[in-house]
């Protein structure tokens, strides 16, 4: 028996991993994809994109993880997760957890392909007809933002995130000229933005008042603070928005200090969402157990893959916290598909973010998921239902790009 063919064990017939390669491509923006191949010729894909720090994950995978995979049994997903997490000794962190997520998702893709089932069937089957998503409406002015929101409404969206320019500031997070395909990372050195909490705190309630006036009350409205407020400021903004019934207020304050959310909760009934930058369950354990948030935004690619995200969701379910997974353009279609299979199958699904990829990106990652009447459905192709056109990927080489940085008006370094 070849060393690549482990003998069947009590755990069942093994499916040896024979190859693991990392593909970096830039069809307009950078994506990192792990491809794991098995002795049967079945392969799986995992997204490993960490916006602005992509090559750190590439090195982590190529230098340290891929050599460990060869010869291992592709079916032993949880065991592989534990091997990579505990085996590194240095646990957690965005780079390592993104790498583990890529392996985890690729192995789930393989297992579902071998079973001949769409992945959500292996995760317990459908809990709903589709995954309700929200789009990003943004504009320099309140009128422009509402006009964008109406476009989303016309496309069938049931929920939309509103971000508008802050008067007096040269640029604002979430507002871009390229409306449908908003991407904050840019080539060259990091762009520097300037921030005014005072001006921001005044414009957001005006935006929501105008939005309810013009869009009505049937559509869910969301807003992303993007880590810019202190807890007490967040409490005040949440209270100011209460009359307009936002679906959630996102990343109202940085969440390294989970207890800080007690202050926000104490002052407002506006639902709170947080977690797109979380790497693991440890980043949200207290937030969930103390019911300090309503939606946890941890996402497959940055929080340890489907296996780990299911644990986060299971903990959240005990406390009536629902999922609200990150789904920005820096998560590749491989991640989007994984999020959809997860979202179909998890009992406490809340809402899924959906920023559309460009046609160039969709061409590199042909996929089975589709949008209809405000919902995405992962499709019924076995596995994740996403492929990678490696020739096309190679035609779009990596280009260094950074997310912006942010300063206060007096030059103090701040949160972007
Ligand atoms: O700024 O993914 O809710 N969505 C977001 C995103 C993040 C980007 C950073 O890479 O906050 O737009
Ligand atoms: Co966000």
Image (cartoon, rainbow, N blue to C red):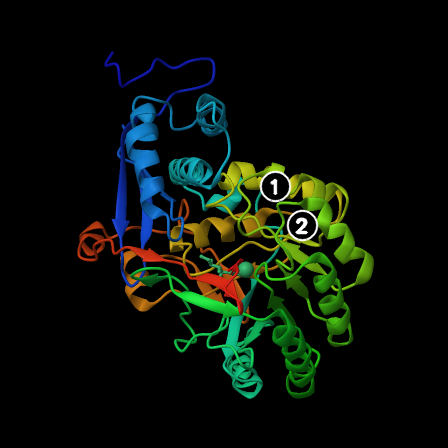
Q: Residue at x 51, y 34 (%)?
A: 92
Residue 102 visible in the snapshot: yes
- Tell me: residue 203, above or below residue 287: below
Q: Quadrant of ligand 2?
A: bottom right
| Badge 1 element | helix
Residue at (30, 21) in percent of width and height: 71
Q: Disc 2 designates what residue?
A: 348
- Residue 78, compared with residue 33, is above or below; it is above
Q: Is residue 409 above or below residue 278?
A: below
Estimate the spatial distance between the alpha carbons at disc 1 and disc 2, rounded to whole Å. Answer: 19 Å
Residue 244, image x, y percentages? 73, 76
* Badge 2 element: loop
Neighbours of disc 1 within 10 Å: few (<14), some (14-19), many (20+): some
Residue 363's disc is: none
Up the image or down, 88 lies above or below 349; here it is above
x, y (%) of residue 191?
Answer: 38, 65
Disc 1 Cβ-to-ligand 2 distance below 8 Å? no
Q: Which residue is mark 1?
A: 283
Looking at the image, residue 386 sits to the left or right of residue 400; the answer is: right
Residue furthest right in the image: 266
Residue 180 location, quadrant = bottom left
């Amino acid at each position: 028996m070849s060393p690549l063919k482990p003998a069947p064990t009590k755990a069942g017939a093994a499916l040896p991993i024979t190859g693991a390669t990392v593909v970096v491509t830039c069809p307009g923006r950078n994506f990192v994809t792990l491809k794991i191949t098995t002795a049967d010729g079945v392969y799986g894909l995992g997204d490993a994109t960490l916006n602005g720090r992509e090559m750190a994950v590439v090195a982590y995978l190529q230098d340290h993880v891929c050599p460990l995979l060869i010869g291992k049994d592709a079916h032993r997903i949880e065991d592989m997760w534990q091997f990579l997490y505990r085996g590194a000794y240095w646990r957690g962190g965005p780079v390592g957890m993104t790498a583990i997520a890529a392996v985890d998702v690729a192995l789930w893709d393989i297992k579902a392909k071998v079973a001949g089932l769409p992945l959500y069937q292996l995760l317990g089957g459908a809990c709903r007809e589709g995954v309700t998503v929200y789009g990003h409406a943004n504009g320099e002015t309140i009128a422009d933002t509402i006009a964008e929101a109406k476009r989303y409404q016309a496309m069938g969206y049931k929920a939309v995130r509103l971000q508008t320019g802050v008067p007096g500031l040269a640029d604002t997070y979430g507002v871009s000229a390229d409306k449908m395909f908003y991407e904050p990372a840019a080539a060259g050195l990091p762009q520097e933005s300037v921030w005014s909490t005072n001006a921001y705190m005044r414009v957001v309630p005006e935006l929501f008042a105008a939005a309810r006036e013009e869009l009505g009350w049937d559509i869910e409205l969301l807003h992303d603070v993007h880590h810019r407020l202190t807890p007490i400021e967040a409490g005040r903004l949440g209270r100011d928005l209460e009359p307009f019934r936002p679906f959630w207020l996102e990343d109202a304050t940085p969440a390294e200090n989970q207890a800080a959310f007690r202050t926000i909760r104490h002052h407002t009934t506006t639902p709170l969402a947080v977690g797109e930058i979380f790497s693991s369950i440890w980043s949200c354990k207290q937030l969930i157990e103390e019911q300090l948030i309503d939606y946890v935004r941890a996402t497959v690619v940055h929080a340890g893959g489907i296996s780990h995200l299911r644990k986060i969701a299971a903990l959240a379910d005990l406390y009536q916290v629902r999922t609200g997974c990150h789904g920005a353009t820096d998560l590749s279609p491989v991640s989007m598909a994984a999020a959809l299979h997860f979202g179909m199958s998890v009992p406490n699904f809340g809402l899924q973010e959906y920023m559309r990829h460009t046609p160039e990106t969709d061409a590199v990652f042909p996929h089975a998921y589709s949008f209809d009447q405000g919902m995405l459905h992962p499709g019924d192709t076995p596995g994740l239902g996403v492929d990678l056109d490696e020739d096309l990927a190679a035609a779009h080489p990596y280009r260094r790009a950074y997310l912006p940085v942010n300063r206060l008006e007096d030059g103090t370094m701040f949160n972007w």
